[in-house]
Amino acid sequence: MVLDHKKQSQLSQQTVDAIADFVDQSAIEFILVEKLPALIHELSQLKTNNPIHNLEPVIDKLVNRFQYQENLNLMLKQEIHNLDKIALKALFMEVGKYVKGEKVTGEKVNELFCLVGQADSPLTFEQRMDTVRQLIRNDKPQLMKKLGLNSPHNHDQKSYPKFRR
């Protein structure tokens, strides 16, 4: 039984490491989100100074998309933290397999979207998976603690047996 626990712990650690190591469009999206207000301001200035028409709907769409994503992220983050250990572990496993390129159904991620009332979200499968992956990554230390796993940053340290006096 010790081997099973040890093997399970290693598998969990590998999954979490794979999630942390995966770099995708989320970093770019984060930079764009930071730059969005300045871009909106520039576009609105362009609209008033140049004979370009119909920029207002584009600006409104960008603002709505930004607000939707921010609200969705907050709801998903809260729901992830409210998951029990079993559901959280299943979510980690599914996202980890996705990150590794394995074929996954996205069942756990879709359940998470249903829990926050976004079952019909306009996001694609990849966008949903990447959103949840980024949220897990952002809160990794707290989520690892909830799962009872050590932080992956500590796995490089050698463990020495502790002796009692």
Image: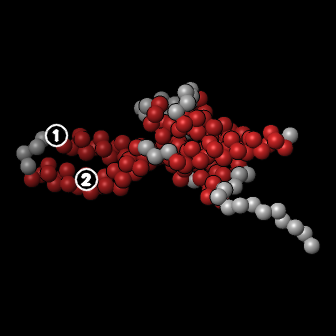
Q: Earlier in the sequence, mark 1 or mark 2?
A: 2
The answer to whether one can see residue 158 in this image is yes
Residue 152: percent from left, percent from top:
63, 54
Which quadrant of the figure has residue 7? top right
What residue is drawn where x is 18% and y is 43%? 55
Residue 139: percent from left, percent from top:
57, 53
Residue nearest the viewer, comparing 129 with 151: 151
State the residue position of label 2.
39
Q: CA distance from mark 1 to mark 2?
A: 16 Å
What residue is drawn where x is 44% and y is 36%? 127
Which quadrant of the figure has residue 19? top right
Residue furthest bottom in the image: 165
Name the residue type under label 2.
Answer: Leu
Name the residue type under label 1.
Answer: Asn
Q: In the image, 33: left or right of 111?
A: left
* Mark 1 Cα-neighbour bin, 10 Å: few <14, some 14–19, many ≥20: few
Which quadrant of the figure has residue 124? top left
